[in-house]
Amino acid sequence: MLFRSYIGNARSAAERGAKLTRQLLAFARKTRLSPKPTDLSALVTNFIDVIESSLGSQVHLQLNLRRRLPRVMVDPEQLEMALLNILMNARDAMASGGVVTIATRAIHLNGDAPMRQLPEGDYVAIEVSDEGTGMSDDVIERATEPFFTTKSQGKGTGLGLAMASGFVQQSRGRLEIESELGQGAMLRMLFPVAHDQDDEASEIGRAH
């Protein structure tokens, strides 16, 4: 029994190490993306079993997914990983449980595009809102820095939001955070609508 315990601990450590390596590679933008025209609402729906299992029984999931949204050019597997990292942060911010909402919607950026450091045009957003402890302005400013975390030692790597932000930027989008202390948080991933899909795929899929 003791030998099996050692094997189990070793396997668990190896899996954690492999996950950390994948996140580091993604953050360093050495992971080659395989972008495809993707319906964000359909991606969430197809990924829902993994999401619910990861959130646990104390967190209630609410969906507000728009139908017939324009497609965006993203790597679906990397987007699932980014979404899962954001959801884990939302879960951890609600120690006593609560509601996490995933929403999708279309957004047109016009006069506010420069402020968001994006070109004008049409985008699709996927938003994750929670009822957790929220973030101060100082924490929001540093939230996407690699290895920055407000969790206690051993509870987080500080790579989740850094990886998500790096992936969204590599996909020509933007990760936005809206939060106040004690008022929960909302994280939004914005992706441009895929108009010329062939050109987008060749450009984004190029190694960085």
Image: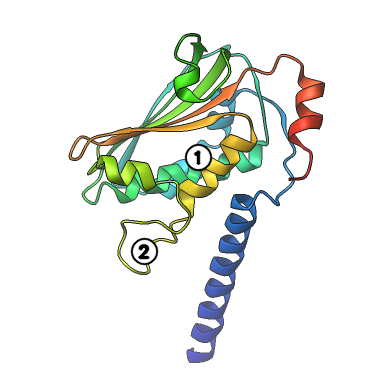
Query: Which residue is pictured at 53% across the width and 74% down the height?
Result: 13
Q: Nearer the viewer, residue 131 or 28?
A: 28
Mark 2 / mark 1, whichever is N-terminal: 1
Q: CA distance from mark 2 to mark 1?
A: 19 Å
Residue 47, numbered circle: none
Q: Above or below — where is 137 with respect to 156?
A: above
Quadrant in which residue 86 is drawn? top left
Q: Position of residue 176 (x, y in %)?
A: 43, 31
Q: Nearer the viewer, residue 176 or 43?
A: 176
Task: Give the secondary structure at mark 2.
Answer: loop
With 59 as the anchor, is 23 left or right in this view?
Answer: right
Query: Which residue is pictured at 40% across the width and 56% down the height?
Result: 148
Task: Give the secondary structure at mark 1.
Answer: helix
Quadrant in which residue 173 is drawn? top right
Q: Nearer the viewer, residue 169 or 194?
A: 169
With 31 as the anchor, is 21 left or right in this view?
Answer: left
Rendering colour mode: rainbow
Is residue 16 among the parts visible in the rendering? yes
* Disc 1 packing (10 Å; few <14; some 14–19; many ≥20): many
Q: Position of residue 200 (x, y in %)?
A: 75, 25
Is residue 104 among the parts visible in the rendering? no
Callout 1 amino acid: Leu
Q: Position of residue 57 (x, y in %)?
A: 33, 47
Callout 2 amino acid: Lys
Q: Position of residue 43 (x, y in %)?
A: 58, 30
Q: Which residue is mark 2?
A: 155
Q: Which residue is mark 1?
A: 83
* Disc 2 packing (10 Å; few <14; some 14–19; many ≥20): few
